[in-house]
Amino acid sequence: MAKITASVYTSHVPAIGAALDLGKTGEAYWQPLFKGYDYSKQWLKDNKPDVIFLVFNDHATAFSLEMIPTFAIGTAAAYTPADEGWGPRPVPTVIGHPELASHIAQSVIQDDFDLTIVNKMEVDHGLTVPLSLMCGQVHEWPCPVIPFAVNVVQYPVPSGQRCFKLGRAIRKAVQSYDRDLKVQIWGTGGMSHQLQGPRAGLINKEWDNRFLDRLIEDPAGLAKVPHIEYVREAGSEGIELVMWLIARGAMSDNPPKVLHRFYHVPASNTAVGHLILENT
Ligand code: DHB
Ligand code: FE
């Protein structure tokens, strides 16, 4: 049967993609950020999964105000990088896993979570930047990826509690897939940042680090935090962090092994957090 071996958590920031694509990773501003992912790149090479289930948010690229799915699963064979205004990033096309994605859709929808099925989608920095951070600059991504898009852009957004429970349903779905596949689940976006209004530039290191502690030790308690606390404490875009609870919810009930933890400010307007948790 398929199993979830580990979860990865990382912020996405479009400027990180630009730094990589424009050859700026050696600059003093970016060096400490990329150094935090050296361990992760080696770990991913040494622990290559068969599939990555990548929870991310679209930033009005594939979806717009015309159509706002709360949870959308990619069942396509491939996803091309989107043009977000400066041309598509020069990164590989993302190869999907339609068979496992369809199985997860079947299981999770029958488990009372109403997913939108996406058979065609371009993917923005929310998906490609985490892949770049974890894989570096490559000609192809290491394995197929199932994109799972969450609406954290247009209110109402899903609660942490619902995301955590959805993670549990995804775990059950993966574990009932009749092939020996190693699956990693990635939760992306966050940490504290606000891109708009009078509080633009807000960063809350203490709150972010407490979030990382609780994600490791007390995810069920963390899932109860209401969305208004994310907005107050971590800024309007800090709400992206609810996506980490989907990945955490998909992990085993046993305490995970913390393989790597990293926190860095600044990266553009965003506090960057990163964790790798292994199932025990
Ligand atoms: C930034 C961060 C984001 O999460 C995003 O989607 C866009 C921009 C930033 O820090 O610049
Ligand atoms: Fe974002």
Image (cartoon, rainbow, N blue to C red):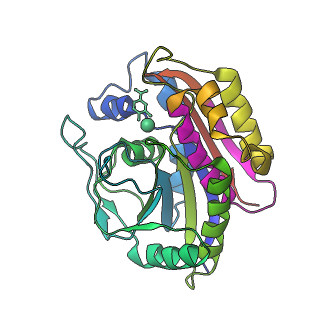
Of the 4 image quadrants, the one containing the C terminus is bottom right
Given residues 21 and 118, the one toward you in this image is 118
Q: Is residue 47 above or below residue 26?
A: below
Q: In the rendered image of this protein, does residue 229 appear above or below residue 112?
A: above
Give the left or right position of residue 196, taking residue 77 as reference: right
Which residue is depicted at the point 37% across and 67% down? 96
**Across the whole image, how many numbered discs are drawn on residues?**
0
Residue 232, position in %: x, y? 62, 26
Residue found at x 49% / y 74%: 105
Judge from the rendering whether residue 38 lies leftward or rightward of residue 19; answer left or right: right
Residue 48, image x, y percentages? 52, 61
Return the x and y of residue 62 as percentages of the image width and height: 30, 52
What residue span does the magenta drawing correspond to? 237-262
Question: Residue 255 at x, y = what percent?
Answer: 81, 54
Q: Is residue 16 visible?
A: yes
**Residue extending furthest left?**
87
Q: Is residue 258 magenta?
A: yes
Judge whether 27 appears above or below 71 on screen: above
Residue 167, compared with residue 28, is above or below; it is below
Find out whether residue 249 is within the magenta segment: yes
Q: Nearer the viewer, residue 239 or 83?
A: 239
Q: Residue furthest bottom?
A: 178
Q: Quadrant of the N terminus?
A: bottom right
Is any part of residue 250 visible from this angle? no
With 229 as the anchor, is 37 left or right in this view?
left
Please state which of residues 84 and 41 is positioned toward the viewer in this rendering.
84
Q: Quadrant of ligand 1?
A: top left
